[in-house]
Image: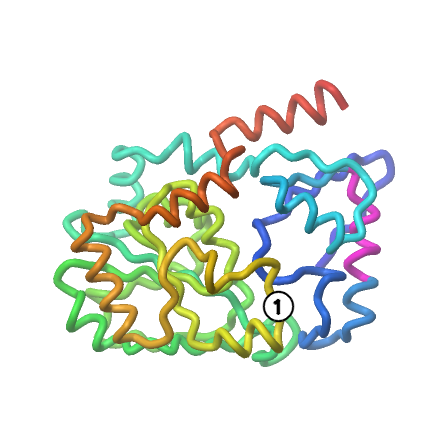
């Protein structure tokens, strides 16, 4: 849903993530309900003409945004203001406060599972299906003594998950207002093609990628902007057994992220220093 732009209003598009999967005009074929490829691209690029400023987290995204949105106006390469929280509030006091508020045991490690939605799996426009494709019972048996698994499904997903018998291992926080809080309390992230891993990379913590449908998503649904299989900042796995083994390896390594994660942070998060909000204010309000 797009918001009409009132006259004499300056429209700052903050966007919501660094892109892995193709966006807007760069998508070859759209599979979403209630639209088609031509209509979708027209609506996207038409909306982009209303933006006076577009925020970008890095040089990589700036190039993509120019193409995907057919964007001709000012791009402020500032880092994302919302990610200032990850730098400025990544401390023990904040983490303990959030865990206590959400009823998360402080004596267990936290795994955050935050997958994206699938364009072609839907009930109706804006309401998407999702199958976890995880053997939660096996995960609980193997990991339950040391870990809590937090689920954070995409807001477009309309599934009501049956987590009976998993209450002491799985916590569904899909409706939690601020995913940044879930980032800072998590010891590792499990995701797929969601842009959450670019944000989480700011914390320099281990990441795993549960990509059971990699070929279908890459080749048919969206396509990627870079070689995800070789450049992802963590191992790619396709079944529950392999996921469990990788989690155990992370534990054995003392939750120290691999060099690939650090290099990924250096490439994509160099502007995320906790001062992005200040840079945006200086650029748009003070100098604009």
Query: Looking at the picture, how far across and down is residue 43, in whole percent?
Result: 80, 61
**Disc 1 on helix, strand or loop?**
loop
Residue 51, compared with residue 188, is above or below; it is: above
At x 64%, y 25%, the residue is: 281
161 or 62, which lies in front?
62
46 horizontally vs 171: left or right: right
Question: Looking at the image, is 95 positioned above or below residue 31?
Answer: above
**Residue under the point 73% across and 55% down:** 68
| Residue 191 within the magenta-colored segment of the rendering | no
* Along the viewing direction, whichever of 50 and 97 lies nearer the viewer: 50
Q: Residue furthest right?
A: 7
Give the residues drawn in magenta, as a range. Answer: 43-52
Q: Which residue is mark 1?
A: 223
Q: Residue furthest top?
A: 286
Q: Position of residue 96 (x, y in %)?
A: 25, 40
Relative height, residue 280 to residue 164 (above, below): above
């Amino acid at each position: 849903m797009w918001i009409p732009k009132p006259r004499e209003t300056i429209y700052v598009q903050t966007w919501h993530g660094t892109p892995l999967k193709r966006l807007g005009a760069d998508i070859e074929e759209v599979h979403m309900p209630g639209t088609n490829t031509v209509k979708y691209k027209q609506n996207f690029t038409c909306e982009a003409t209303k933006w006076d400023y577009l925020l970008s987290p890095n040089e990589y995204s700036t190039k993509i945004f120019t193409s995907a949105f057919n964007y001709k106006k000012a791009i402020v390469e500032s880092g994302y203001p919302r990610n200032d929280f990850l730098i400025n509030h990544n401390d023990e006091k904040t983490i303990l406060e959030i865990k206590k508020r959400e009823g998360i045991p402080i004596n267990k490690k936290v795994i955050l599972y935050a997958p994206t939605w699938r364009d072609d799996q839907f009930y109706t426009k804006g309401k998407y299906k999702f199958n976890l494709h995880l053997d939660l019972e096996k995960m609980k048996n193997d990991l339950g003594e040391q870990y809590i698994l937090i689920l954070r499904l995409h807001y477009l997903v309309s599934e009501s998950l049956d987590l009976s018998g998993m209450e002491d291992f799985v916590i569904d926080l899909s409706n939690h207002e601020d995913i940044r809080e879930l980032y800072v309390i998590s010891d590792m992230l499990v995701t797929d093609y969601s842009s959450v891993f670019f944000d989480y990379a700011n914390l320099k913590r281990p990441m795993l990628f549960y990509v059971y449908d990699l070929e279908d998503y890459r080749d048919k649904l969206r396509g990627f902007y870079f070689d995800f299989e070789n450049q992802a900042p963590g191992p790619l796995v396709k079944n529950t057994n392999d996921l469990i083994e990788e989690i155990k390896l992370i534990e054995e390594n003392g939750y120290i992220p691999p060099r690939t994660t650090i290099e990924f942070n250096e490439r994509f998060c160099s502007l995320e220093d906790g001062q992005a909000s200040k840079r945006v204010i200086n650029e748009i309000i003070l100098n604009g």
